[in-house]
Image: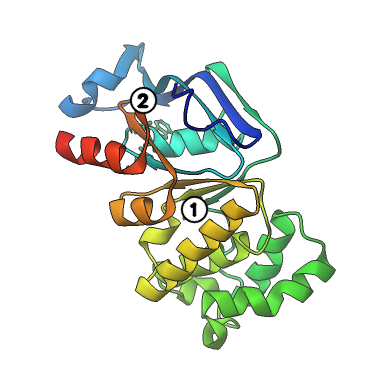
Amino acid sequence: MDGTEHETGELTVVVDDLHVDYKAFASGKTARSQRALMTRQRGVRIVHALKGVSFVAREGESIGVIGHNGSGKSTLMRAIAGLTSATSGAVYAASRPALLGVNAALISDLSGEKNVMLGGLALGHKPKEIRELYDQIVEFSGLEEFIDLPMKTYSSGMQARLRFSIAVSRDHQVLLVDEALAVGDKAFRQKSEQRIRDLREQAGTVFLVSHSMRSILDTCTRVIWIDHGNLKMDGDPQEVVSAYQASK
Ligand SMILES: Nc1ncnc2c1ncn2[C@@H]1O[C@H](COP(=O)(O)OP(=O)(O)OP(=O)(O)O)[C@@H](O)[C@H]1O
């Protein structure tokens, strides 16, 4: 763990020797590249998604999480949000972290408008608060013309914009953003990145999972590199991103 550079704000998240295993019923052959990650147990396949990850996060940090496909980044976000339980080790969080992912559950048969209400309630807003925030959320999303159409008629980028706009309508002490920025267009991405910086300045901690090193470098004060379920590097964004890129 890097104990020297991040000692200013209050602790918001402590990840202590976190292991997460998934059990899946296997059929067919295990792909060769996945073999190192897996152990076979009587037809049940165990995937060791996280293998003892430890770090602490503080107020005012914006932490980029990078790593190859399947390295364990989303699992780490889900574990911090309390949606996936630890096989061993623990996550301690100062307040309930909010996970904003491209798979966050809104209902695609309902209109954008109804989903703003639904998403707002899921975030803990009162109906009156959602009505007050409604115009601001829709304006941020840039989807005014489409807001009365069912969400299933939206492109994946439009859906992600709406999810992001709902999630950032509230200040979170710990906000976890999983790949949501990758799908928006340039203007929306810049607006989203600015909002992430604002949230961080309001003494929150933001985690941003992304494959876009540009987004990571533009937004983050620190970067964590997850590799095959292990924390490979944790520190200065430029240093960690350079090391990651050199490893490819
Ligand atoms: N529900 C699940 N059941 C079984 N295995 C899973 C499950 N979810 C994830 N895994 C496995 O756990 C490992 C880590 O997956 P995870 O989604 O955390 O990776 P990631 O770094 O977020 O990948 P990506 O960059 O592709 O989104 C992978 O090997 C994946 O196949």
Which callout, 2 or 1, points to the residue nearer the camera? Answer: 2
Instruction: Locate residue 59 relative to residue 188 in the image: left or right.
Output: right
Residue bearing the label numbered 1 = 103
Q: Residue 122, position in %: x, y?
A: 70, 55
Asked whether mark 2 lies closer than 8 Å to ligand 1, one says: yes
Q: Is residue 212 visible?
A: no
In this rendered view, identify the residue nearer to me: 138 or 60.
60
Q: Residue at x 56, y 30 (%)?
A: 7
Q: Amino acid at mark 1?
A: Asn
When the figure is inspected, residue 181 is found, relative to residue 148, above or below; the finding is above
Viewer-nearest residue: 173 or 147: 173
Give the class, few, some or many, for how many residues have Cα within 10 Å of label 2's Cα (few <14, many ≥20).
Answer: many
Task: Report the side of 124 relative to 232 (left or right).
Answer: right
Q: Nearer the viewer, residue 60 or 66?
A: 60
For disc 2, the marked residue is: 229
User: Residue 35 sits in which quadrant?
Assistant: top left
Q: Position of residue 126 (x, y in %)?
A: 82, 62
Give the position of the N terminus as an image quadrant: top left
**Cα–Cα span, label 2 and label 1:** 21 Å
Q: Position of residue 161 (x, y in %)?
A: 49, 68
- Residue kind at label 2, given as amino acid type: Gly
Looking at the picture, how far across and down is residue 117, in whole percent? 71, 68
Residue 242 position (above or below residue 89): below
SS assignment at label 1: loop
Judged from the image, the secondary structure of the residue bearing numbered disc 2 is loop
